[in-house]
Amino acid sequence: MGDWGLVVGGRSSCSSGKGRSHQGPAKYGFSLVKGKANHPMEDYHVAKFVKIQGHVIGLFAIYDGHLGDSVPAYLQKNLFNNILKDEEFWTDPSKSISKAYEKTDQAILSHSHDLGRGGSTAVTAILINGQKLWIANVGDSRAVLSRRGQAVQMTTDHEPNTERGSIENKGGFVSNIPGDVARVNGQLAVSRAFGDKNLKSHLRSDPDIQNTVIDSDAEILILASDGLWKVMSNQEAVDIARKTKDPEKAAKQLAAEAVKRDSKDDISCIVVRFKG
């Protein structure tokens, strides 16, 4: 498996970069900016192309950690490997993605003595031969696709109020105390996540999965952590990203705009511009 692009982990206070496949199905850029909270950067990401069995595969992900960066760092190293090495990936990508999410979460929980009690959201995108796009997520990191300038949300934000029934059926509760954000057991502001061993009996880690064909209507894919989406609508993000053909500049502009709008969270953003 040879790299056709680059992969960078997000621990530095600010980083960016770009790349493209040698066969040119897409260009991509990324930007990561540490938030204002008094802890190290907790976002990690993947942005690269690999060649497998004659196929060109684009791999893009953002992992937004909480209570430390051990779990997102683990996801960066392992989640895509678990998806791609599954024998059914080429015939049933959705099944392989679902199995890999579950397998990876179980591995994180079994290594909690090393990884700690924290967790992570995830949004992952797999671009197969520049033609088929598979998106999966747990938590509130989000993927948005631009089709002829119109924003199409490809993920589901997993919020405690939305999945209150599932949480309560498992013996948990949803509370807005402390603070003004709904949280599982008053602690976690998402209802699905990797890790979080202390809350796992009340959380889900199964992903929502969507797929679409990348045709001439598909222009840009944006993956970002909630540090962006808390202060920006899907359409606003698409409008900013479409103004430049350089995806790295677009990612930087999105992150800068989120900071300008007083986002206090870590901000991670990947912009993929399709060749069509």
Image (cartoon, rainbow, N blue to C red):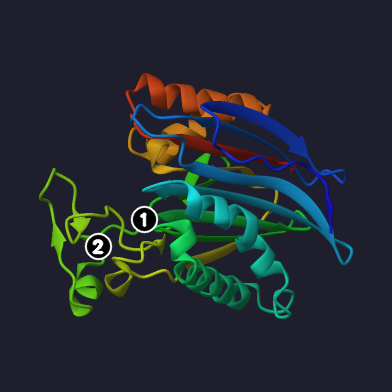
Q: Closer to the N terminus: mark 2 or mark 1?
A: 1
| Image x and y of residue 259, in percent | 40, 23
Above or below: residue 214 compared with residue 211: above
Give the camera-side residue of 102 and 69. 69
In-image side of 127 versus 210 (left or right): right
- Identify the residue under disc 1: 157
- Identify the residue under disc 2: 162
**Residue at 53% in and 23% down:** 253
| Image x and y of residue 159, in percent | 28, 57
Check disc 2 and report its element: helix, strand or loop. loop
What amino acid is at disc 2? Thr
For label 1, the crowd category at 10 Å Cα-Cα, with few meaning under 14, some 14 to 19 and many 20 or more, is many
| Image x and y of residue 145, in percent | 54, 47
Name, please, the residue furthest toward the left.
Answer: 177
Quick one: quadrant of the N terminus? bottom right
Task: Using the rendered image of the protein, determine whether residue 158 is visible from the camera's viewpoint.
Answer: yes
In-image side of 198 versus 71 (left or right): left
Above or below: residue 251 compared with residue 69: above
In-image side of 126 versus 44 (left or right): right
- Asked if disc 2 and disc 1 are in contact, CB closer than 8 Å, the reply is yes
Check disc 1 and report its element: helix, strand or loop. loop
What amino acid is at disc 1? Asp
In-image side of 86 versus 250 (left or right): right
